[in-house]
Image (cartoon, rainbow, N blue to C red):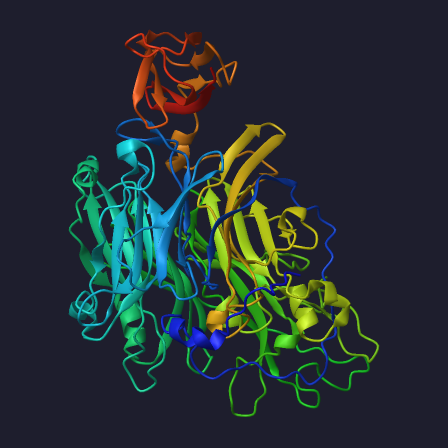
Amino acid sequence: MKRVTFFVVLIVLVGSLLADDLMQPAGPDKSLTSPRNASGFMYSSTRDRPAYEFIVDPTSIVSTYYDYMPGNYCSLPLRIQPEISNPYGLPAGGAYAIFMSIETVTAERRIFYAYIDADGNVTATDPVSTNDVRQGFPGLDVDCVTGNPFAAWHAVVEPDNSYDVLSSYDLYHMMGSPGLWIDEFISIDNPEAGEPTTGFDDDEFIWPSLFTSDSSPLGEDYRRVFVTGNNYTTSHGALSQPSENALLSYADFSTDDLNNQSTLDWNYRTIAQMDAWNAEDPIWMRPMKGCAVSDNLVAYAGYVVDYDATINDAFVLINENYGEGPFEFYSSDFIFPQWNPMNEDGTEYLFGEDSCYVVVQEIFEAGHMNIQFKDNNTKITWSGNMAITFDALDGNGPGYYYPTWCQIYPKEIVFDLNTHEFSFKDLYIEGADAYDNVPMVPWDLDEDGVVDSFDGDGWPEWVYNWPILYPADAFTYNNYKTVATGNWLVCVWADGTKAKRFYDGDNSFADWEAVPEIAIIISADHGATWSEPIFLNANDTPELAGQIPSYVYPGDVIEVISNTPGNYHGKIQLFYLDDNDFGSSINGNGLNNGGELMYASLDIEFPDAWVPTSTDDNEIPTLGFLAQNYPNPFNPSTTIKYEIKEAGNVTIEVFNIKGQKVKTLINEYHTANNYSTVWNGMNDNNESVSSGIYFYKMKTGDYNSVKKMILMK
């Protein structure tokens, strides 16, 4: 367990100052003290977990004094560039991370970016904005053409003292390197942006997520960028509780607009269904949701609850016209009746003892997730918790639970855009049939309707699970993130089961004090089936020794390492906080002594081949193949082999590390065949170039490939 003794700052100095723009729970606290100790056991699976190894060991990006959710509540702050930055054909393929950080204990919370090159080296870390004001909760996406990142965050920058959403983008495509962020501009101007559609003049849409589409209704070279914010203002009715209806801001852009550093022409709209929930029309409802964009499709999805905990519905709002026009609304009840087991001699119920409580399983504290399109944009998927809750029939209503009993379990929820049906799967832990749309019963894993085992006192035993980072406050510390690339999927969450068992008084878990785990599961069939989790932690994973990994985000692309028969491997990139003390001081847990924001990458073996979706086709070389040069490093010359699979014009050019072209090796028509060329370290002026890193790029038809080589003299 990590110990920090050299410097401690009391959380009361800053905690109250930094928590005012955090999402807040609504309604009464429904966690109860359990009537007896938990009678459970840890799950032990007979299935193999995926093989993996670290490509890049956990590497520090920057130290920080901000120790909560450094990226985004409901989207991914680690985005992977395309291999080539167009229109100039510059090498890209790196990753941008965006995050909140406090550099010193007295500094403002600012938005920073980091650039990680294709080899996993952190090459840049700086503020996105030069404006030294408190900034928060950034969103990020990368333009598919230029590789430029777009960013959004919230801050108070105007005299009206309201939160606005600010944006910027980095001109990576100009030089083939990061760090040319344009001056920030307002992409959501609160409260003015929402008032025409909500009718309220106090709404503040913050916590932005940002997405770029590969196309636009304007056609040609245009793409569309979307910024969606959630309402910070409580509902407009008698309850006045959090109800985060969304505002969607969007703008079309071309590469020329980026060259001209345009702040773009933004349009605004809200969604009537969510506006009604916030207006308490007819009743208060709260949507916990994410957003996703793919081509012309814009979706919001998640779950929605009412104040009395009688409604717990999965929902989807889908638009097929780039966010313009109506959003179609679909929902499904996700409250599932659960049988209440009795003790071994049949005299008392597990829930209620002398009287039988009404027990259900329902979506529970699962609001910090992203959503994804999958299966060729025919489905929407997200992951989150379902839990055992109950109604004691005492007039206080449903939704109560015993935190110390650890009866919370990960699920995948799926919406089919063709049939408009919802389904779900047990991700971990599975029952007899994980895919039957019936929640796993934690005291009846074989699903035969009989309690599997009883403890020494005759009470039913169940399988423990707490898929939440910290042992308390499930609302604050839940975090699920999913990535889909073709038929390959990855889902990542924080698992705190063992740490919580010690926290709740079970000394057999003493080694797990303040030791949360990163859980990673994979699928190679669009999520039809899922693997057992890979668990990474400070006790069992040497690369994480001494760490407290928190708020883990995967990169938004699974990169294909190998796709040959029987050898299917994907690269997963991770961004997370290695906390110096367990728990978030911002939320009143743990010390305000900072931590390290970290980057790592894994090679994970998949059970089946990667098959691209229609939008991934450009990732498979169909017209050619460019091999790695040999020798590499080299002096004075190196050979580059390549294959042309379809006759056409071929260019192979050499660029320096600044993205400047130094030599054209090939520019001619080729028939289908295998070829090679030699570079002798000379430029187009027949001058010898200096030692260093160079890139060579091959283009034929729609095929582009770039590889790195090193000249050493």
Above/below status of 98 relative to 355: above
User: Residue 692 versus residue 148: which sits nearer the camera?
Assistant: 692
- List x then y, in percent, for residue 348: 74, 86
Q: Is residue 336 visible?
A: no
Is 310 displayed left or right of 494 in the figure?
left
Q: Residue furthest front?
A: 6
Above/below status of 98 relative to 305: above
Above/below status of 367 relative to 414: below
**In which quadrant of the rendered view does residue 604 lie?**
top right
- List x then y, in percent, for residue 650: 33, 13
Is 403 displayed left or right of 372 in the figure?
right
Q: Residue at x 72, y 60 (%)?
A: 43
- List x then y, in percent, for residue 695: 40, 23
Q: In which quadrant is the N terminus drawn?
A: bottom right
User: Residue 304 versus residue 621: which sits nearer the camera?
Assistant: 621
User: Residue 458 versus residue 19: which sits nearer the camera?
Assistant: 19
Q: Residue furthest right?
A: 456
- List x then y, in percent, for residue 151: 31, 51
Is 62 displayed left or right of 328 in the figure?
right
Q: Residue furthest bottom?
A: 394
Total labels drawn:
0
Q: Is residue 511 visible?
A: yes
**In which quadrant of the rendered view does residue 205 lie?**
bottom left
